[in-house]
Amino acid sequence: MVSALALAFIWIQPVFAQQVTGAGAQLVITTFVNIVRFFAVGIGVILVVMFGYAGFKYLTARDNSSQIAAAKQQMFNVFLALFLFLFGFAILNWIIPGGVIGVRAGLGGI
């Protein structure tokens, strides 16, 4: 029985999903990659500004403990947003053929 299963695994050919090729598929993937890159830059800028604003709030809070706590909470939220963004970006790099980082817009590479 075990040898029959072993032989079955040897002769079974893997089934691959049909790959979409051609200029149309490449255009769709390149456009999607460009959109993801645009939003990545935008989110990066927003996170840097938000962290700077939280740092400014922390520095100007002086002895007001509620403002210090609010600034620390905002810093934590910025780091949480950064973590979630990087996690989503990693998933997109895994899903998109060639990855978001590895594909050059207009040059193919897929």
Image: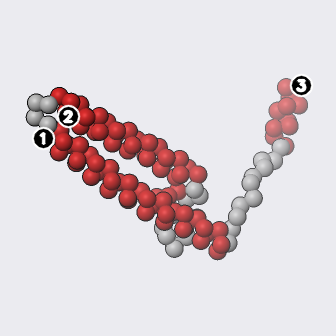
Residue 21 in view: yes
Mark 2 vs mark 3, foreground winner is: 2
Mark 1 vs mark 3, foreground winner is: 1
Cα distance, mark 1 to mark 3?
75 Å
Q: Is residue 12 left or right of residue 58?
A: right
Q: Amino acid at mark 2?
A: Gln
According to the image, label 3 marks what residue? 1
Q: Secondary structure at mark 1?
A: loop
Q: Amino acid at mark 1?
A: Thr
Q: Earlier in the sequence, mark 2 or mark 3?
A: 3
According to the image, label 2 marks what residue? 67
Q: Earlier in the sequence, mark 1 or mark 3?
A: 3
Q: Position of residue 20 (x, y in %)?
A: 70, 64
Q: Residue at x 25, y 34 (%)?
A: 70
Q: Secondary structure at mark 3?
A: loop
Q: Residue at x 28, y 39 (%)?
A: 75
Q: Position of residue 23 (x, y in %)?
A: 64, 74
Q: Nearer the viewer, residue 19 or 6?
A: 19
Residue 102 in view: no
